[in-house]
């Protein structure tokens, strides 16, 4: 799936999420905020999408295999160290393994829409981080 909103900001984001309901929620939330979105339902396909589209940010959602998800994140960091990576985790802070990979932000999968957009906005420089923290 690839959609483009006509509203700003002009930032390309790729979402990797195996749960189609969550994928649609993240898509709608980001699309309505003006981001350019690519969505992938299967982690095996994500590397090819990444190479083809070179997004500025990747959001990693749920995966049946935590090892596959973390290995994919490691590959992304090596392939494109400037790409921002957000990990959506069932826990606010995931295991020690996630901290070693170098995620830019780890968010709880049960986060509010506003906080989710704040995190994305801060990393894409479309929102002022100081204003977000002050809330």
Image (tube, helix red, strand yellow):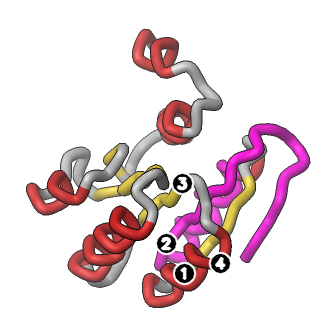
Which residue does the numbered mark 1 point to in the structure image? 41
Query: In screen coordinates, is 85 left or right of 49?
Result: left
Image mark for residue 17? 2
Residue 46, above or below 93: below
78 or 60: nearer the viewer: 78
Which residue does the numbered mark 3 point to in the structure image? 57
Query: SS for tag 4?
Result: helix
For the residues carrying marks 3 and 2, which lies nearer the camera in this image?
Answer: 3
* Rendered-image quadrant of the N terminus: bottom right
91 or 60: nearer the viewer: 60
Query: SS for tag 3?
Result: strand
For the residues carrying marks 4 and 3, which lies nearer the camera in this image?
Answer: 4
Label 3 and label 1: CA atoms lie apart by: 16 Å
Per the rendered image, the range of residues in magenta is 1-30
Q: Which residue appears at 54% of the width and 54% of the height?
A: 57
- Disc 4 vs disc 1: Cβ atoms closer than 8 Å? no
Q: Position of residue 62 (x, y in %)?
A: 38, 70
Image mark for residue 133? none
Toward the bottom, the furthest residue is: 44
For the residues carrying marks 2 and 4, which lies nearer the camera in this image?
Answer: 4
Q: Is residue 17 magenta?
A: yes
């Amino acid at each position: 799936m690839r959609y483009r909103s006509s509203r700003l900001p002009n930032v390309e984001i790729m979402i990797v999420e195996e749960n189609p309901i969550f994928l649609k929620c993240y898509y709608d939330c980001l699309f309505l905020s003006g981001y350019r979105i690519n969505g992938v339902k299967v982690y095996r396909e994500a590397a090819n999408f990444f190479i083809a589209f070179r997004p500025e940010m990747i959001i990693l959602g749920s995966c049946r295999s935590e090892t596959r998800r973390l290995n994919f994140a490691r590959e992304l960091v090596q392939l494109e160290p400037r790409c921002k990576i957000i990990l959506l985790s069932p826990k606010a802070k995931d295991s020690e393994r996630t901290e070693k990979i170098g995620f830019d932000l780890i968010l709880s999968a049960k986060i509010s829409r506003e906080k989710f957009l704040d995190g994305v906005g801060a990393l894409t420089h479309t929102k002022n981080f100081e204003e977000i923290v002050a809330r």
